[in-house]
Amino acid sequence: MHDATLRSDLRAVSGHLSSLAADLLVLPTWDGDDLADIPELDVATAGALADARARSEWRGKAFATCLVAVADASWPARRVLLIGTGSAPESTAQIRRVAAAAMLEATSRRVASVAFCLREVNQTVEAAQAAAEGLTLGEFDGGSYKSDAEPHTVGNVLVARAGAASDSEQGAALEQAVARGRLLGACSNAAREMANEPGNTLTPTVFADRARQLAEGTTLTVDVLEQPQMEELGLGLLLGVARGSAEPPRLIVLKHEPDGAADAPVLGLVGKGITFDSGGISLKPPDSMELMKDDMAGGAAVMAAMRAISLLGVPIRVIGVVPATENLPGGRAIKPGDILRSADGQTVEVINTDAEGRLVLGDALWYAKRCGATHLVDVATLTGGCVVALGKITSGLFGAPNGWVEAVQRAAGIAGDRVWPLPVFEEYADQIRSDIADLKNTGGRAASPITAAMFLKAFVGETPWAHLDVAGTAWSEEARPDQPKGPSGVAVRTLVELACAHVRWAGIGA
Ligand code: BES
Ligand code: MN
Ligand code: ZN
């Protein structure tokens, strides 16, 4: 796949700090921490640590860093970076985030090798996995079109059980957790890389090629439907949105069908794949329109998650569906007032051509069901209203029945993606009733993320379905300690965790 995103070599080790072969030792620290579990550190830094503490340079505050030199020449490491996790030393989510922040810091300091040390309270497989995820996420570089010199790469990275003797059973569990974190981080970065690509380099055709590349070295099968097949199937909503564009649309379908998997459940993952959203005839204002190159972030998340699901050997069937097209104005583009017919035979009055995501997803959800999906999740940069409601921290979560929505919420919690539920009460459907057709594609300003979800709901019937609106979370317009400006890779790990948790939800809706 895109091992371009994997620039370092990452391994798991156990051992005393004095033996860790890395230039920089990273140690998570927290409020009230006294480093009592690693007394050798104060000696090895010749008291510099105690000094830093006396001057309040070393604090546990989240992401606060303190760098001290190692004085003991017998240690391979030259520096120690303390980085704060805040008040919760054992929080896996916080370990993931500080590991990412530490990797960004190590890269900007042009350090050659790093050991991220799991302290006594962090020596769980979950924390090891999270550290590997964070360190890998911290490797992502969004400057892929810069002509100047190669950015610095931290070549060797360790996730270390600090102070622990190497015990072969625990060592194997640690290695496995680190490999899993590495894979989840790498697949998140693959999704970020795609979301970062501009509309002129990542057309629907190129996006489909990326799906084929992501399937390399896995057992995934990839089917790419072109216009004639879409016409045959009657995917009128997807074809309608594509009409304004000179680039042909694609319906990208990835299938994970492991040997011996039961007929049910079949997890259906559907991702919005608008490779550029200008709004169409209902043209968007120019401010920040360039960011609409990431309107395929949901589709990228689905494709990248499918790779991880296959490589992890998840024992159930999973299918990924990504409706890919541009949304552009043009002489043949759909116009407000036009009526489209969906694959499942519903008629839709297009009120605003900028509400294109729900159109392409309506047909894609139908297609996922047709392929046998028994449980659906879609991921979409769907509404500006979701950004107003939940900001850039939390993705909106919608769906039915509640048990299924809760399964998604739980997976997101494990993955470190923040999500929060919003209702899909039937009364909201009144807002998208059309005078002339079955549905209209906008429901006005009130509760716009919910009426968008209600539109999708009209295409899923009784199948358990959850929808993640990632309009606010797919892209960060500001640099944060743990994430540079740009694509976040949101939802990739949630989808993978959900697939892995199938035993918990397989009975829902059956
Ligand atoms: N892709 C946009 C939603 C979006 C907005 C994503 C801001 C990221 C940041 C979507 O296609 C859209 O244009 N939605 C409109 C729908 C409206 C016209 C009913 C919206 O929410 O404003
Ligand atoms: Mn739009
Ligand atoms: Zn859009």
Image (cartoon, rainbow, N blue to C red):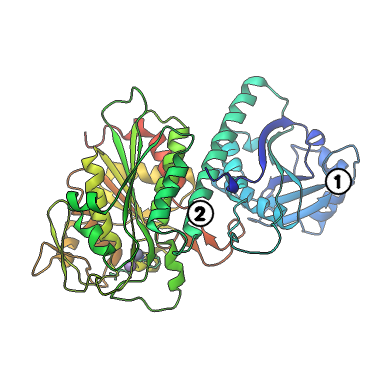
Q: Earlier in the sequence, mark 1 or mark 2?
A: 1
**Mark 2: amino acid:** Arg
How many numbered marks appear?
Answer: 2
Q: Nearer the viewer, residue 359 or 468?
A: 359
Residue that label 1 marks: 70
Residue 463 % position (x, y): 21, 43
Q: Quadrant of residue 306?
A: top left
How packed mark 2 is, by other alpha carbons closer than 10 Å (few <14, some 14-19, many 20 or more), is many
How far is disc 1 from disc 2 in space, using C-alphas?
36 Å
Residue 356 % position (x, y): 28, 64
- Asked whether residue 172 appears in the rendered view, the answer is yes
Q: Quadrant of ligand 1?
A: bottom left
Regarding mark 1 in the picture, which secondary structure is present there? loop
Residue 154 % position (x, y): 71, 48
Residue for point 29% across, 74% down: 330
Residue for point 41% across, 59% down: 203
**Mark 1: amino acid:** Val
- Asked whether residue 59 appears in the rendered view, the answer is no
Relative to 391, 96 lies left or right: right
Relative to 307, 316 lies left or right: left
Q: Are the two marked residues, 1 and 2, in contact with CB atoms closer than 8 angstroms?
A: no
Regarding mark 2 in the picture, which secondary structure is present there? helix
Residue for point 32% across, 53% down: 250
Q: Which mark is residue 192?
A: 2
Residue for point 33% across, 71% down: 279
Please, is residue 262 above or below residue 407 in the view? above
